[in-house]
Each structure stands twice: as structure tokens, then as C-alpha cells.
Image (spheres, grey):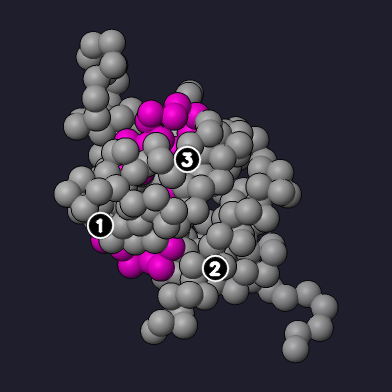
Amino acid sequence: MPIGRVTQVVDCREAMGMGKGGGIAQRGTISECRYPDVIVVGMSPGRRHVTKPVCDITSGLRQQGVEYSISTLVLNAGSGVPPDAPKIGGAVLGAYFGLTQKEIAQIEKHKVAILHHGNVRSHVVHKVRFILQACDVKAVVVSQSPVDYEDLAKEGVKTSVVMPPQDKIRTKGTVMSIVSGVTRGQTPTREKMAEVISSVMKIVKKKQSLE
């Protein structure tokens, strides 16, 4: 049993960050750990898409003694909505949300994916659906706006609570838990971090027991 301080080596990112002190990771970067257990997937950084909660969640999991390897992935095209999402009020301004084959492979290596997609409810739902269509992984959804399992199931997303009709299922991956009320650009509260940690530990322990 360790006594006193425990040293952890953290590989923050594979490329230099942006902004003052290099505090924000660039798009298209991933910090990989030795054993692929948990990956935190964040939006591309920008004026409206703040990636701050992603780093807080990653460091918070480590600080709480979660004994799993945790990677962080900042998507190359993490802004906007997927090209197949319904267009409300005309054309979509800006870039479309998307995944590269490399990003899909990186996500699928892990046991759990924590998906953080901001504050627009419809965007969160369609981004989660798009990722889990491509990636066969158990997911924890983290958002600022309230999202429920029925919202996801209506778009064909498999969840641990509500399943779409068999002929309407559109995803390979499954949403196991949802943590709403995590404000973008701010450090998550202890209560929200506890929800994320509890959700992650349940999924990883269950998968380990089945292996």
C-alpha cells in the first residue's frame, strides 16, 4: 500500500497548445496513455467551443485515484453539426462536424469514451449519434444543456435506459450514462465530477469482469 504522495506521469498532448501559456490543445491532437481504458473526446477549440471542461475532467479522474489510463482527444472537425443532421432554419453556417478514420480507431481502442459537446441540445444529440454510428464503444455523455436518454433514442442511439425500436437503431456504440449541467469554460463542480467518475468506474469494472 503506498504511503504519502504517489507520482503520476501525465502526457498532456502530442502537440503544442494555443493561447497564453499554450493552455488549449490544438485540434486534431491526442494525448495517449500506455493502456487504453478511458478517452475524453472534446470539441475543436474556438471562440464558441471551449475545451476547458475536458482537461478538468481528465485531471479530476486522475486526482481522485481512478486507476485507469486516461487519454484526451481534441477532434479535428469538432465544431458544427454532422452533415446528415436535420437543417433547422436553412443552411448550416461554418464547418460540418466529422470524424477521420484515425480518430475512429483512436476512440475504439478504449473501453469508455467521455463525449463532451457543449451547450446546444440538438448539436449534442446529433454529435453523439454520429460518433457512436462510427465507433463501437461505451459512452458517457457530458453536456451543459439537459439531454435525456429519450432524446438520444429518438435519433436511433442505443442507451442503457431507453432503446430505439430494433429497425431504428443507428449506432454501434451505446450511451451508458449522461451528466448534464457541466458548464463549458468553467471547472466542473465536485458533484458533477463525482457523477462522471462514478459512471466511468462502473463501466470499466463491468468490462474488466467480462474479460
State the residue position of label 3. Answer: 148
Residue at 71%, 49% in the rendered image: 191
Q: Residue 38 location, x and y as percent?
A: 47, 64
In the shown orientation, is residue 186 left or right of residue 120? Answer: right
Residue at 46%, 80% in the rendered image: 208
State the residue position of label 2. Answer: 202
Secondary structure of the residue carrying tag 1 is: loop
Name the disc covering residue 172, or none: 1
Identity of the residue furthest to the top in this view: 89
Identity of the residue furthest to the right in this view: 4
Residue type (three-letter) at the residue carrying disc 2: Lys
- Categorize mark 2 by other alpha carbons within 10 Å: few (<14), some (14-19), many (20+): few
Name the disc covering residue 125, or none: none
Residue 128 sits inside the magenta stretch = yes
Please give the range of residues in magenta. Answer: 105-129
Secondary structure of the residue carrying tag 2 is: helix
**Which of 112 and 59 lies nearest the eye of the viewer?**
112
Asked if residue 26 shows in the view, the reply is no
Residue type (three-letter) at the residue carrying disc 3: Asp
Q: Answer with mark 2 or mark 1, whichever residue precedes in sequence.
A: 1
Q: Residue 187 location, x and y as percent?
A: 67, 41
Judge whether 21 appears above or below 169 on screen: above
Judge whether 99 appears above or below 71 on screen: above
